[in-house]
Image (cartoon, rainbow, N blue to C red):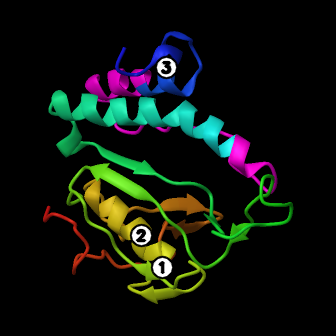
């Protein structure tokens, strides 16, 4: 019931949140959930309401459930999309409009897994267009996320076309200072 009425319907996001909790209980190390269709270049007001209804209850239930079962401190939950979005209207009119892709600013939220509760990092201008404080390169984000998972980003390599490559591409630093990252 905590996950909502959609959790009883296989394949829904809410049902997948419940499935994710069960997989985590069985010590599955990585679980990834998808909810598609967030690319709203038009009809944003109607679509965002419907999509938020799809994900809010299941996501909140998953985090509460993991916490109640003592699994959240060892489970890193990351919520993000494929890129940033503008905060201002793209096309249309006041009741039907969209938002464009954003190349400079990107927001994610995380819970559990060594991340300090209530912490935020970085800041943008009033239009959320330019980073004004604490920029983080994607290589640094990946290095920090891997660190929270107990993986040294410099040692994690994969073989590709005869070369050992890594996710942080020879760059990336774990962001510890003011990062909200608990020591490992």
Quadrant containing the N terminus is top left
Q: Please tell me which residue lies in front, 150 or 132.
A: 132
**The image quarter in which residue 21 lies:** top left
Callout 2 crowding tier (Cα within 10 Å): few <14, some 14–19, many ≥20: some
Question: From the viewer's perspective, is residue 154 above or below residue 26?
Answer: below
Look at the image and give the residue range highlighted in magenta.
18-46
Q: Which mark is residue 182?
A: none
- Residues at marks 3 and 1 touching, judged by CB atoms closer than 8 Å: no
Please say if 66 is above or below 169.
Answer: above
Mark 3 crowd level (few <14, some 14–19, many ≥20, 10 Å Cα): some
Mark 3 lies on residue = 15
Magenta region includes residue 37 = yes
The percent coordinates of residue 39 (x first, y second) are 73, 52
> Are the residues tagged 1 and 2 within 8 Å (C-beta)?
yes
Residue in the picture at 39% in, 61% down: 156
Secondary structure mostly seen in the magenta stretch:
loop
* Image location of residue 104, percent across then percent down: 61, 79
Q: Which residue is mark 1?
A: 137
Q: Position of residue 153 (x, y in %)?
A: 36, 67
Q: Nearer the viewer, residue 165 or 3?
A: 3
Observer-nearest residue: 142 or 89?
Answer: 89
Q: Residue furthest bottom?
A: 132
Assign a secondary structure to mark 1.
loop
SS class of the residue under badge 2? helix
Position of 23 compared to 179: left or right? right
Q: Earlier in the sequence, mark 3 or mark 1?
A: 3
Label number found at residue 141: 2
Residue at image x 79%, y 48%? Answer: 43
Do we see residue 27 in this rendering? Answer: yes
How crowded is the residue under tag 1: few (<14 C-alpha within 10 Å), some, or many (20+)?
few
Residue at the spot 44% in from the left edge and 29% down from the top edge? 58
């Amino acid at each position: 019931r905590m996950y909502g009425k959609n959790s009883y319907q296989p394949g829904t996001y809410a049902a997948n949140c419940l499935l994710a909790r069960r997989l985590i209980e069985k010590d599955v190390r990585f679980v990834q959930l998808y909810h598609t269709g967030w690319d709203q270049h038009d009809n944003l007001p109607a679509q965002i309401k419907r999509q938020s209804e799809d994900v809010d209850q299941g996501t909140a239930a998953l985090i509460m459930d993991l916490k109640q079962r003592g699994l959240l401190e060892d489970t890193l939950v990351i919520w993000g999309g494929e890129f940033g979005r503008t905060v201002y209207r793209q096309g249309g009119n006041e009741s039907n409009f969209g938002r464009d892709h954003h190349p400079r600013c990107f927001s994610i939220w995380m819970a559990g897994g060594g991340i300090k509760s209530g912490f935020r990092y970085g800041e943008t201008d009033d239009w959320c267009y330019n980073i004004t404080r604490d920029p983080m390169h994607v290589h640094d984000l990946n290095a920090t996320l891997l660190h929270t998972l107990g993986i040294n980003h410099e040692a994690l390599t994969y073989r590709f076309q005869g070369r050992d490559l890594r996710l942080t591409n020879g760059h990336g630093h774990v962001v510890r200072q003011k990062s909200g990252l608990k020591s490992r």
